[in-house]
Image (tube, grey):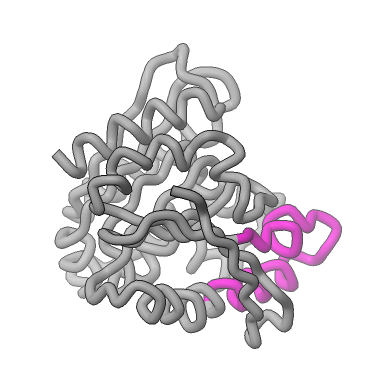
Amino acid sequence: MSGRYTPFYSNILGQEMGVMMYGDAGLPFLVFPSQNGKCHDYAGFGMVEVFRPWMNQGKLRLYCVDSLDDQTWSAFTRPPRERMLRQEAWMRHITQEFVPFIYRDCGYQGRLATTGCSLGGFHAANALFRFPNLFGTVIALSGAYDARWLLYGYMDDLVYLNSPLHSIQGMPKNHPFIRQYNDSTMILCCGQGAWEEEMLRSLRLLERALREKGINAWVDFWGKDVNHDWDWWRKQTAYFLGTLFS
């Protein structure tokens, strides 16, 4: 089962974005690459093969997109507000252009799944937290959920929207999103080994905020030997897919 590449021109962004598609049936997973990544990366790091047993059973399919991180989270020389305006444009591209493309391509009717590792894990979780009407399942690995981390501590209204930690902390307990979250499957995981310090810190704080708001999520901390690396993300993905589709 080989992938299909499609160039996707975004009118919102004013540029071409690539997508790699794998699988022919089942729950569509929108796959966000790691920082500055492209749509081919997921296959290059062996992650598509992890999904293949469930793809072969017709249970899921993958839509792997390009990131725009080099214009947003990684654009360290640009003013933070400018970076966040571009992030918002990218989110509009994802929700207003790319999600409809997925529905047209595969005919799926329900809410989509998201997944990703590292900054891709943040994007995957952020998509569901912001748009639970569009996304109903997330497997987010080693994401950092305090958006100030890559913005030198900067905060404004757009950072708040894109910072799951702060958005959940500030959410009223009667917010209508909470019911939608609790109708979703949310899996948030990180290790406790090398290069996981910020991910571990922010996920622990997010876990507390979710619990305080009555939001059900599977927050899983793996051992102190579990590093911020693809070897572990492949193992974690296989484990959580096995549970999700058992």
Q: Is residue 228 left or right of residue 176?
A: right
Can you say whether 191 is above or below 120 in the image? above
Residue placed most toward the observer, 242 or 20: 20
Residue occupying the far bottom of the picture: 11
**Residues rendered magenta in the picture:** 66-91
- In the rendering, at what x and y percent does residue 150 appear? 67, 49
Can you say whether 212 is above or below 30 in the image? above
Residue placed most toward the observer, 143 or 37: 37
| Residue at position x 43%, y 48% in the image | 1
- In the rendering, at what x and y percent does residue 15 appear? 73, 78
Can you say whether 176 is above or below 5 in the image? below
Quarter of image, res 213: bottom left
Q: Is residue 107 left or right of residue 162?
A: left
| Residue at position x 66%, y 70% in the image | 17
Quarter of image, res 134: bottom left
Can you say whether 100 is above or below 26 in the image? below
Res. 115 in view: yes
Residue occupying the far right of the picture: 77
- In the rendering, at what x and y percent does residue 86 appear? 68, 73
- In the rendering, at what x and y percent does residue 89 appear? 61, 78
| Residue at position x 45%, y 21% in the image | 192
Q: Is residue 208 left or right of residue 43?
A: left
Residue placed most toward the observer, 136 or 147: 136
| Residue at position x 42%, y 31% in the image | 190
Q: Quadrant of the C terminus?
A: top left
Res. 166 in view: no
